[in-house]
Image: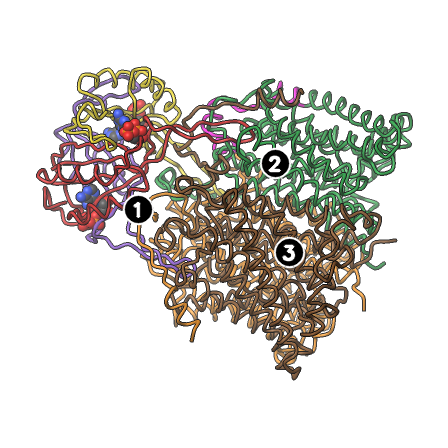
Chain colours: A brown, B orange, C green, D red, E purple, F yellow
Amino acid sequence: MELQPVHVWMMVCAALVLLMTPALAFFYGGMTRAKSVLNMMMMSFVALGITAVVWVLWGNSMAGGGSSVGGLFGNPFEQFGLAGLIGTEDLIGAGFAGTFAIITVALISGAIADRARFGAWCLFVPVWVTLVYAPVAFWVWGGGLLSAEGAIGSWAGEAIDYAGGTVVHINAGVAGLVLALILGQRKGFGRDPGQRPHSIPFVMLGAALLWFGWFGFNGGAASDPAEAGLIWINTMVAPGAALVAWCVTERIRDGKPTSLGAASGVVAGLVAITPACADVSPLGAVGLGVVAGAASALAVGLKYRFGYDDSLDVVGVHLVSGLIGTLALGFIARDTGLLYGGGFEQLGAQTVAAVVSMAYTGAATLAIGLAIHRTIGFRISESDEQTGIDLAEHAETGYEYGGLGTSAGSFVPHPATSGHLELSK
Amino acid sequence: MELQPVHVWMMVCAALVLLMTPALAFFYGGMTRAKSVLNMMMMSFVALGITAVVWVLWGNSMAGGGSSVGGLFGNPFEQFGLAGLIGTEDLIGAGFAGTFAIITVALISGAIADRARFGAWCLFVPVWVTLVYAPVAFWVWGGGLLSAEGAIGSWAGEAIDYAGGTVVHINAGVAGLVLALILGQRKGFGRDPGQRPHSIPFVMLGAALLWFGWFGFNGGAASDPAEAGLIWINTMVAPGAALVAWCVTERIRDGKPTSLGAASGVVAGLVAITPACADVSPLGAVGLGVVAGAASALAVGLKYRFGYDDSLDVVGVHLVSGLIGTLALGFIARDTGLLYGGGFEQLGAQTVAAVVSMAYTGAATLAIGLAIHRTIGFRISESDEQTGIDLAEHAETGYEYGGLGTSAGSFVPHPATSGHLELSK
Amino acid sequence: MELQPVHVWMMVCAALVLLMTPALAFFYGGMTRAKSVLNMMMMSFVALGITAVVWVLWGNSMAGGGSSVGGLFGNPFEQFGLAGLIGTEDLIGAGFAGTFAIITVALISGAIADRARFGAWCLFVPVWVTLVYAPVAFWVWGGGLLSAEGAIGSWAGEAIDYAGGTVVHINAGVAGLVLALILGQRKGFGRDPGQRPHSIPFVMLGAALLWFGWFGFNGGAASDPAEAGLIWINTMVAPGAALVAWCVTERIRDGKPTSLGAASGVVAGLVAITPACADVSPLGAVGLGVVAGAASALAVGLKYRFGYDDSLDVVGVHLVSGLIGTLALGFIARDTGLLYGGGFEQLGAQTVAAVVSMAYTGAATLAIGLAIHRTIGFRISESDEQTGIDLAEHAETGYEYGGLGTSAGSFVPHPATSGHLELSK
Amino acid sequence: MKLVTAIIRPDKLDGIREALESYGVQGLTVSQASGYGRQRGHTEVYRGAEYTVDLLPKARVEVLVSDEWADDIVDVLVATANTGRAGDGKVWVVPVEEAVRVRTGERGDAAL
Amino acid sequence: MKLVTAIIRPDKLDGIREALESYGVQGLTVSQASGYGRQRGHTEVYRGAEYTVDLLPKARVEVLVSDEWADDIVDVLVATANTGRAGDGKVWVVPVEEAVRVRTGERGDAAL
Amino acid sequence: MKLVTAIIRPDKLDGIREALESYGVQGLTVSQASGYGRQRGHTEVYRGAEYTVDLLPKARVEVLVSDEWADDIVDVLVATANTGRAGDGKVWVVPVEEAVRVRTGERGDAAL
Ligand SMILES: Nc1ncnc2c1ncn2[C@@H]1O[C@H](COP(=O)(O)OP(=O)(O)O)[C@@H](O)[C@H]1O
Ligand SMILES: Nc1ncnc2c1ncn2[C@@H]1O[C@H](COP(=O)(O)OP(=O)(O)O)[C@@H](O)[C@H]1O
Ligand SMILES: Nc1ncnc2c1ncn2[C@@H]1O[C@H](COP(=O)(O)OP(=O)(O)O)[C@@H](O)[C@H]1O
């Protein structure tokens, strides 16, 4: 068989989505303190490495490749190692799907910046992907519970979640909130001005690459040019509108529009359009972007009021704008939304899907998080937090611009010996 | 209808072009002082946000979607909100075209680094896109004045502007010059060594991503593999040759080839090949790159001689190399150029198109710029310039590497209250 | 002729591979000291510029475009300037092939960080591409020596090198080792702690963009969706596994997993999967990634033991993992590997190809390197190394965050005069 | 007048400032420093090569005070910066012959 | 000899250097500092959270001078750095017992 | 007690530290500085515009020592930092009236 346009498109899109996780590493990494930047980025990178392996081994099989186990998940052993897909074009779809699992779990890390034990995170990632991401993806996209033929979906109606408002953003937002509560506040939360972002250009780099990758995220599954074009346009205009809306909100509230706000607005707009990208008009996308940008700009302050340290606003951005996008479809979905005369069915289906996912993800993440926290511990020591998690957990610092901090010291080319010895075994 | 290769190609290319605007933010941002980096980047980001919305609302309709209003522009209301395109593959083309509008207006900002009021810029962007970009794009590509059937084009011959030498680069260069003159010199222009670039790696990052995106910029409209291949090769080799030429020019004149020069050479070469990418041979592209690289390397010094503060050399790079590429087609266009025995027609057409665009853009930009400058004011105060425009206009600073500048101070989680209150309204 | 999916795919892939060289500039640049970052990046950028031109002029013709000259290389004059390809879709393939030449020569620069004369490097690049890269590429991919019909390949069997394990990585690794030996150690090698990486986020940015681009690198030549899908999956999972393996190796040996290690692991895994991407199963790719990640993690220490200053580990990463990937095919190639019951033929062919390339590249690079070193000199002076190569060779410094280092000084807008004079000649 | 210089842990800076403020000190100058002493450094690892860092980040606080207040200020600084662990730093006092407030040209104690 | 230390606004540095140079001072040492005093800081906003920054960037200039020139140098520094707005800084003078030029080993006034 | 301050080339720092250590000095404080003097600066070029940089990077080393050791320490510093080329720097000595170890509150020579 020759390559078809849809193959090319999906492979390109999958590569774009893969790039989103390192992009997230910059978006998040720029927002932490300089002494935590590497750990923040590593949480995304290691999520990428681990989840890629998990996905190939059993994740893809559980999220849709394997046959349904009670509508809850696919049989993980059926396509273990992607056996059965080799020699077929379905490998492309498996790759595309894998990149979604990767970014979803990576998104969570923003809620626990500066204070999570790296080992604990490395354990959390595969467990969460297996027990939370894969099932929920199966419910929505793999023919499970929430799909038209599923137990809930057949009763409440099938929710629209084109590219992952529920599966990716609401999911990650809820999981982030739960972990933030388990780990507790950073030392100095809400008081220490040292907790400002250390490199806003990195945040903007991250936002830009996320936007770029998101064309793949939203568009990859399209096989019709009119649909693909609509998705493309909506993925351009919703974040644009949200950027403007976030800046305007800041201008009114704080007096100045900020660049951190602009970058955040882009992401909020992208999150909101994710479930809706194929089902709203460009004008609808503008409206959705405006609402998401403004709402998330306001929502990021809630953590100070309620005292949960969702450090980099996974809740304020991903949960809030994810919910807005998901629920908005009940109103502005072009075929079935209320404003298009479609009745309350769609809104009901959207609400049910969101609530079910939130409940399951919340409970399951709580269980996983507490299990890790109570056994090996999920939080670094107070003195490590003081020193900086990069040094404490990775024995590295992000930058050395020629200052005096590290230029004086001794140097031991450690692996000269051990490396050689181990190699020569 | 199934996706066709041209759809896939254009969507990928459109995403690549969209990435060019954040790339430009880094290219420009790295060249400013550290205390202006965010404002510089924000001028690109907000241009992205605003223009995306404007394009969807009326811009696309004006640039070609709507029916011609006297050959001057398309009817802005005809396809307002892209109505009429929904459900068709033409949405893809509208998206692709939108990314060109975005980058063009963003390019202008390099001429007014460090000193433009952000609010004034936010006003300038939509007005300029509407009154300048959209009409000129309509003239050249939308069947207007300068096209074969247009009033001027039918008389002077149709100019070749495959990917935007006139519409994008000459346009932006002239507009930049006009704004630089309106705003006046930065304090310390030509004297203050603090005005050196603060992060050359960012400049190189920007140049690299611009190059990457430019494959989409030049190639996106190609539907024939031989043409597409020629464009691809030319887009690789012209900037390569220009990079080398800029470095050699510096080696001769200043004694050392610089990395800022290499990055600038890449962009100059890309600018020059833009109009010509589909109409010159690879050897022609090498020659064009060499000329553009050397000429722009020399031209960036003109601002000191003539005293206009085109801070980041929009004129020296985009206007000069844009003109070189546009006029060179009169000589080396493979079918119609002088050197290919094609007579003076092509050179005449190229010259007329360049002159008409420059005249219109210059006059219109002057009017818009002055209108803004005389009313709300386009320039920040001297003390704000001293403090740094990032702090003055955005209440942010780009970096905090753990110095003492900001780590001591008090922290007020402002939105805790207002955010909540406004949300709960 | 209409664009076909393979055309679109290959053009996108070629743009992705082009992006890899700037990505490498960041991967390498972040690993040097702050005072050498620009020179390190420039070695990649100028390699890009020069090789792009060389490729269009005679490189492509030598690597396969021209007719065979004794099985050693293609006739360089036959398609000089890509003449003969203009008007055909083969231009796309020529562009794709050119990006491989570019990255290969750029890879070498990591071995000679901080101390190579820039002029010498600018000479080395075109000579090495012409005398080493183009012939070896011709042997393996162009129908030369090592291909099925070639003198060696027809005797030893045809080696599998799908995307360049031998041609790119082993080649670059050997050349790097040779140049490192010719130039000698940096002052303070193995003792000066100032030689730690100055910006690990840049290293991670480089690794991320390399990974992204590598989907094009490995996949670009695929024309069958099943094969393309397999390549895609393998290109996702092998670096993922290698990332994890490198981190685990560090955890065991040094006590902490590092982010520099994670970034390095990604590259090691990508190198190892390069020759094998189309011929191993996803499980095989996981295994290959694990072995390559761990082996390179150990191998980077060898330079301290043996005293060659391969500054950024071109040998430890590219040569070692390139060999692992190349030889592993003898065991795990799905059709012909030992573990799949294929006998020793494949292993033999792989070994012969690797050995022949290493011998030729080693000898030829030694000759070129010594010729340059003995004539114009390949190494900067000790005092320039002390000052920093950026200042010495490029009259620039990478960063200026507003410190006092450069803000006080005088400013001479040099080109104001000379620039103008030269322009007005 | 005296110049009191304190080398302290950077995270003690906020506390010091508040303590001095409540003591009536209206200005001070801070700069970054690195210290070497009894406090043990840490180890960093890059591609398996270990780097031991012995110079540790400190803040240097300088306060001009009148002769009569010098002792009290020293006591305040020592009390506030103390944690009891190695690396707490030093405080020293140097005689100052003249001090001027640039804005007004005031000299002596009036300049503080 | 005396050590004259001046805490000044960073943008006054060039002027200071020129003024001292024309006064015959052939060398000086500068470092970055942050100052806290009467001058009001500024506010930064990140995702709606306001940060008030009270430590403001200053430059510290140190000049070794012979006893007889000390007063004049102080006057030059004060005159050049003055803008009349809060935050102009301080100049102070400390006695120096010995000074050595590292290159030659010269001591005393010859070392300056 | 005395405070010995040395402005040196940054790359001499390691040598200085070792020399002082072998001399029994158990602590010192280092900070970044920029110096202006006889040493010529360098030129940078950005898009053809030349920038002459006259302020050159230096390290400032401060060591508190007891009165009797001050001269020796100065000699060690001068000897170790010397290269014979312009820009080697200065060493100067200032009297200290009091010194306190923050951790223990020890005063005088015991605090060093
Ligand atoms: N003799 C000295 N001269 C100048 N600074 C010193 C001296 N000794 C120590 N310091 C500074 O004091 C800091 C703390 O000293 P250290 O010996 O680590 O702990 P402690 O004073 O608690 O015993 C050092 O990091 C250094 O900056
Ligand atoms: N008592 C002091 N000791 C040391 N430095 C001081 C003192 N008071 C002020 N400074 C320095 O002088 C700078 C200017 O002081 P400030 O009170 O803001 O303005 P002014 O001196 O013009 O009244 C401060 O930022 C600080 O660096
Ligand atoms: N009068 C001075 N006061 C303070 N620092 C000085 C003075 N003169 C020189 N320095 C410092 O000493 C450094 C070396 O001085 P310089 O004149 O370049 O060389 P040398 O001392 O070898 O003649 C300068 O960079 C500066 O930091």
Q: In which quadrant will I find the N terminus of chain D?
A: top left
Question: How far apart are labels 1 and 3 at the CA level?
Answer: 49 Å
Magenta span: helix, strand or loop, mainly?
helix
Q: Are marks 2 and 3 on the same chain?
A: no
Q: Is residue C61 magenta?
A: no
Q: How many marks?
A: 3
Q: Is mark 3 within 8 Å of ligand 1?
A: no
**Residue occupying the point 26% across, 23% down:** F91
Picture coordinates of residue C163 (x, y %)? Answer: 77, 39
Q: Is mark 2 within 8 Å of ligand 1?
A: no
Amino acid at dot 3: Tyr
In the picture, residue B265 is in which quadrant? top right
Please tell me whether mark 1 sits on a helix, a strand or a loop: strand
Tell me where the magenta segment starts and ends, as one range: C369-394
Q: Is residue F103 above or below residue B188?
A: above
Picture coordinates of residue B408 (x, y %)? Answer: 31, 48
Q: Nearer the viewer, mark 1 or mark 3?
A: 3
Q: Nearer the viewer, mark 1 or mark 2?
A: 2
Protein chain holding label 3: A
Report the disc number at residue C264: 2
Q: Is residue C382 magenta?
A: yes
Q: Which residue is mark 1?
A: E57
Please tell me whether mark 3 sits on a helix, a strand or a loop: helix
Amino acid at dot 1: Pro
Q: Is residue E59 above or below residue B57?
A: above
Q: Which residue is mark 3?
A: A133
Q: Are marks 1 and 3 on the same chain?
A: no
Q: Is mark 1 within 8 Å of ligand 2?
A: no
**Residue occupying the point 82% across, 34% down:** C160
Q: Are marks 1 and 2 on the same chain?
A: no
Q: Is residue E95 above or below residue B232?
A: above
In the image shown, does C380 or B280 lie closer to the viewer? C380
